[in-house]
Image (cartoon, rainbow, N blue to C red):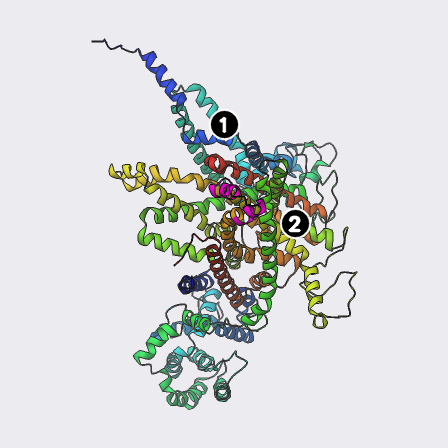
Amino acid sequence: MTEEVEKTPEELEEIRKKADLQYKTYSEIVWVQFKKYPQSYYSLYGVFALFVIAILAPVFSLNVPFFINVPAGVGPENMQGMHFPWLAALFDANFFEGGLDIFFNWLLFALPGAFVIYKVMVRTKTFANPREEKAFIGRYLGWAALGVFASFLAIYMFDFRQAYVDYVQLSQLDGVSSLFPPLQYSYRDVDLNAVIQDPSWQHWLGTDQQGRDVFARILYGTRISLTIGVVAVAIYTAIGLVLGGLAGYFGGRVDMLVMRLIEVMICFPTFFLILTLRGFIDDPSIFHIMVLIGITGWTRIARLVRGEFLRLKNQDFVQAAIALGLTKRKIIFRHLMPNALGPVFVAATFGVAGAILIEASLSFLGLGPATAPSWGQILTAGRQTGKIVLILAPGLAIFITVSLLNLMGEGIRDALDPKLRK
Amino acid sequence: MTTYIIKRILLMIPTLFFISCIIFFVLNLAPGRPGGGAVSAEGTQDSTSAEARESYRIFKEQFNFDKPAFFNTRYALTRGEVEGLLVTLADFNKPTCEDGKPEGCIPADQKPTSGSIIEAQDTVEDWGEYIVPHLIAIARDGDRLDVRIIAVNRLTVNAKQRLINEYNKKQSPEDRKRNQEISAENELLGSYRVAVDASKEDVDKVVNEKWVPWFETNAERWNWTFGDKMGILFGDTRFAKYWSNLIKLDFGVSHVDKRPVLEKIKERVPYTLTLNFLAVFLAYLLSIPLGVWSAYRQNSLADKIVTVALFMLYSLPSFFIGVLLLEAFAVGDPFAWFPTGEFVGKFPDWFQTDAANTDQMTTLEYMLSVGYHLTLPVFCMTYGALASLSRYARSGILDVIRADYIRTARAKGLSEPMVVIKHAVRNGMIPVLTLLGTMLPALIGGSVVIEYVFNIPGMGLFMFESIFARDYNAIMGVLLISTVLTLIGLLISDISYAVVDPRISFD
């Protein structure tokens, strides 16, 4: 009879750590695969850079100085002394008219803040093993996203407004010292003395028919394109997941109903349908455009999810889950949904590119949001004025964004299913 | 195969039914009334001008907006409901109470708002002849004189009968004769009005001498049997009118120029179809050899270059390239090789012709002119489709290239072109063919932008113009026709699927 060797807690810990190192989650495998495609891997950085540009736009271009020091006796009396108007302007609902810009401006502070808090929390906490740490990161990301969004809503509801001050003129007075962003223009800055100008050191990409700086508009247009792409796709992915999931899981009559609905929907040329629905909105904001793209684009996702559910439902692990008597909710959300999400994620990535194109076409046709600095609108200005810069700049912006997203989508698709690699 | 096609065509009927239902829902239940832009300029905004009101009423009648969407229960309206609205209208005309105005005034807080007055006026108009008996009753023995006056004047409009086939240019002689009678009566009824400040005696006189006798001779028009009521409940609604018009293939008239929508669409379909057909044809013609060529050189430098180039083309928005090409090759900065728009009419400079307009062109000249105009738009529409198609073609070939039957074909000594064309391409192109179905709707819809850039008067541009003009009937017509075209496209793609792949049998 052999004596069983008691393992010390340290040894047990050692074994567990080893097991954890070998254990790889599905997403980690996908990530390793994804890194094998350099073009897609770098395009991920490219997309990330686009988001950073969108967030940093007011640092590059705003007609409000970071600080301004007006000495006594110069300019209006209430403006004298040291001011920091840039910070206040970022949350000014008069200055940035939509919630979208204020949201991005808030991210400028909220994201670094969330990052610092994360670093501090990681320092102070100790984790038993890497898995626990990962779970913590996941939880933290969820709470941070919720916190950022909730604080944005609070700021937006607060509806901070202040009177407009022409800081550019003020800064030109004698003795006033100020520091402006590199470009002293906001995207709404109309200057009728500088209409349709060629690129110069003052206006890097020239101006449009109303004398607005095109570079600033392209910069802020990044926000619109990315938001519309992401939110519209989020809307239709949600619809597609629900309808496709219902059809795939329950089958029978529900399936037939959903499939008929999809069949009817795909007969409409999507763009025509969007145009028609757009015709009923008198003064569309970018949120209308998102919803329009969202409610017309879900068929593809729904079909994908339904197919995946049908395929997965007959697999052993799902049958086992059913046999174990798990609730429907558990089966759908813990067993079926995570396994069906891969192709949906790929379709969504390509969908973001598609949604950006649809928004650009709508704005190009003059059917987009009227005041927003959308890329399609700048292209229209280029068409009307015949200025090649006004055509090339927004066109290339759209092209770069769309191709980065498409490249990323290809990488994810190949990483999820290496068999597809050709 | 034939049974399959017949089955598919029969299945298209319920699909079409659902589609037309959805179009009806969208156009009728969406916020904002179609034609709102045109109407608010002349109608609702300016409710004081009688002429504007009348033209708005005719507009509503013409496009069936005076009818309820699904169920018409207006036969069951009561005198009280009608009187309530008339009192609102009458109250609005009363002076507001101030210090010096004690008689017949209304306190400022009880005075109806202009919003409720517009609504009341709209509702009374929409109820049309259904409320004639109530109006007569109110005019005869109403309590308030001003309400009675409004009732009488309302009667001059609401008692009018509608002309038969009013908006059809080709009326039958009987209809025309009947319409003349109706117009004569309508004109007569229109003259039975009273002044706004008429005395009680005047009103009594007009009502008792003119309206009551007229109503008694025509009373059977308002004595509805149960069958009549059911007919009204389901028949006299927007939904029913929509369907009866659809079955007659009557999309109504465009409210921009009052021409039948179908006629306008018929004029434009050839342009769109020419453009789309050329683009799809060229895309298939070029992409399949390109895909095969690049699959056969998999991972070579040439393949990589082609793949990258196609990927970039795929991400280039066509409207951007369209505007760029227009600017560079048509406007004259730096070149003016192509016309700046339109479908036909101009010729290249080097071409000698006697034709002064399109009617004088020979067929060959016409085709040349069309080709000259369509070069840039077709290029714009082709390259995107080309990019995605050849990527599919390439992966289709790669799927089959290592299959056993290809090796067998080589082993039995077939020439390489034979292997490629007969064995590899035929099997590898099935996924590419299925794309045809999904491409057609995208191309019809996608051509809005191209037609807009190059000013080609096709369906896309028509849709765009109709949306700007809020042309209800035109939007509905274009949407329906384009979905029918899409359905046909899907059918063709399914059939071609079966033709190419003998493994698929639908029987």
The residue type indicated by label 2 comes to Ile
- The chain holding disc 1 is A
Which residue is at 23% across, 8% downward?
Answer: A3
Is A286 above or below relative to B195? above
- Residue B250 or residue B77, whichever sits in front: B250
Q: Nearer the viewer, mark 2 or mark 1?
A: 2
Residue B257: percent from left, percent from top: 59, 72
Main SS category, magenta section: helix
Tags 2 and 1 both on a single chain? no
Is A28 above or below relative to B437? above
Residue A5 got which mark?
A: none
- Residue B212 or residue B446, whichever sits in front: B446
Is B291 above or below relative to A45? below
Q: Quadrant of residue B298?
A: top right
The residue type indicated by label 1 comes to Phe
Element under disc 1: helix
Does residue A303 show up? yes
Q: Count neighbours of disc 1 (C-alpha within 10 A) and say few if under 14, some if 14 to 19, many if 20 or more.
A: few
Q: Is residue A64 left or right of residue A126?
A: right
* Residue at far front of view: B413
**How many marks on residues?**
2
* Residue topped by disc 1: A115
* Residue topped by disc 2: B321
Residue B308: percent from left, percent from top: 61, 39
Residue A131: percent from left, percent from top: 39, 24
Q: Which residues are magenta?
A: B398-422
Magenta stretch: includes residue B190: no
Pointers 2 and 1 in contact (C-beta within 8 Å): no
Q: Count neighbours of disc 2 (C-alpha within 10 A) and say few if under 14, some if 14 to 19, many if 20 or more.
A: many
Residue B126: percent from left, percent from top: 44, 73
Does residue A93 show up? no
